[in-house]
Amino acid sequence: MLSALKLKTTSLLGASLMAFAAVGVIAPATIDVAHAQDEGRQFSADAGEKVNEALTMMNANNPQGAINVLQNLINTNQDLNPYERSTIYQMLGQNYNDVDNTSQALSAFQNAINSGGLLPNEVGNIEVVIAQLMIVNGQYREGATKLENFISRTGQEKPNYVDLLVQAWVEAEDYRRALPWAEKWFNRASPKERRHFDLMNFLYNNLGMQGKQADIVKEMIQKWPEDNSLWNNWASMLANGGREQDAFEVNKMLYLGGALTTEPEIKKVIQYYSFYEMPYQAAQILEREMANGRVQRTPQNLEELSTYYRTAREYKKAIPILEQAAQQGNSAKLYAALGEAYYNEGQCQQSESAFAKAIDRGYDAGKSWMQVANCRYDSTQNAPRLECSDYDFENYETKKSAVKSAISQAPISKIRAEAVEAFNKVPAGSRESRNAKKWISFVSNEEEAFVNRCLFEINVERELCYSKIKLAYDNQAFTGGDLIIDDPACLEYKADYDAKYVTVTTNQ
């Protein structure tokens, strides 16, 4: 739109030059002073001759020649009246504009005003020309301000002025100043074209006027429903307005309708599925799109796919994807993710192997060994539990070493020892070191806790039988009959009870 400004400037100056004809300044004719209509608004013979010479050059498309004649006239003739100077400066401005010397053109037009030989309406015309040239010259704010002042003073709000102001304020990135002119420009447009809607959408977006932008975008979607960018714009507006669920529905509709085909568009829909806690569906879409080639099978995308499967607790599906991603990407992060996936599947050896590769590539050794150790320890859940009845706790005091040795050979004890070994590999300077030590203490104390529990159970059973045996002796003493122990399981403790209590009592 700004490229048309030069033509508009030329046409305005043409109108000014037509005024010269009224006083005899018509190429290639000569000046006829007798035909001047207003006193003081006429050319002398000498000045008129030079002006006619310049006009002849202008008609011959020789603006530089006209500049030379006119500039020489200004420089050498000190007797020029204000009207002559104003007219000559206008012509200079026209010709400087024609040779694309905008700065000299601006200076000449301003001198035309300053010379004092123009009528008010002529001054207004030149002010508009100056404003136009400023805008063309990149002085958007200055030119637009000058044009606004002219309109405010004269009330002349022509359509081309409105067009200019819209362009200038947009170029100046002063969207708030551009908006009222743009709304006038938009409202009068008939028929309204895409460019009219695009500009209003742009301005409302940059000014944060979401309500008005929504109205424009809705109207645009009705006119151009096949334009995916409009739907994407609409979805973004919904998301920015806190209506994420509606934005998701719009994107999902576009995807299912086949409107979204590029990788960024497809991944945006996938991320929506993940955001709304549908990781398995996100993984299925991503895997399908990688298979058909619309999404590249890069290490990053493979890692994202595995993340969705892991979030959905589909670790078996995640592992082969992560294996491929780790082989392609060869990064510590990917091998660590693979190690974690193996851990979640209880595949401790594979997990340890993956974490070892992650450590070799710079991954945190503390985190890695904590995962390996936890994997080993968690596998104790699948091992047979220790049972008190499997060991000789009746004679624990005399066979303590043998009992503990037997316990250490149990499968669950061996797994605990392997877990402690891994916890011990957590570096002392690691953030995980403190937790590792706590785990070592906890795991190491589990065997002792088992022994204490078994001894406690033995003692409880013995003390209970002692009570029953004592009750039987009391009953015998009262009735004078036979000794009757109600619980047969307590008979094995009678000899021990007698040794401790009955014999001693008899001796007394």
Image (spheres, rainbow, N blue to C red):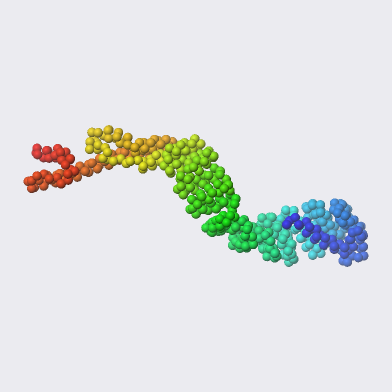
Number of marks in the rendered image: 0
At 32% from the left and 41% from the top, the residue drawn is 385
Q: Residue at x 58, y 52 (%)?
A: 265
Q: Position of 72 compared to 297: left or right? A: right
Where on the picture, by quarter, is residue 233? bottom right
* Displayed quadrant of residue 135: bottom right
Q: Quadrant of the C terminus?
A: top left
Q: Is residue 362 above or below residue 276?
A: above
171 lies left or right of 125: left
Q: Name the foreground residue: 105 vs 241.
A: 241
**Observer-nearest residue: 450 or 482?**
482
User: Relative to 122, does residue 445 appear above or below in the rendering?
Assistant: above
x then y, percent, for residue 445:
33, 39
Where is residue 92? Give x, y as percent.
83, 55
Residue nearest the observer in this picture, 33 or 372: 372
Tell me where residue 463 appears, x and y as whole percent. 19, 43
In this image, 299 relative to 440: left or right? Answer: right
Give above or below for 30 relative to 319. Answer: below
Left or right, 273 with respect to 207, comes to left
Q: Residue at x 54, y 58 (%)?
A: 249
Please give the name of the residue rendered at 92% of the width and 65% of the height, measured from the top-left corner.
34
Query: Do we see residue 416 in this rendering?
Result: yes
Residue 77 percent coordinates (x, y): 88, 55
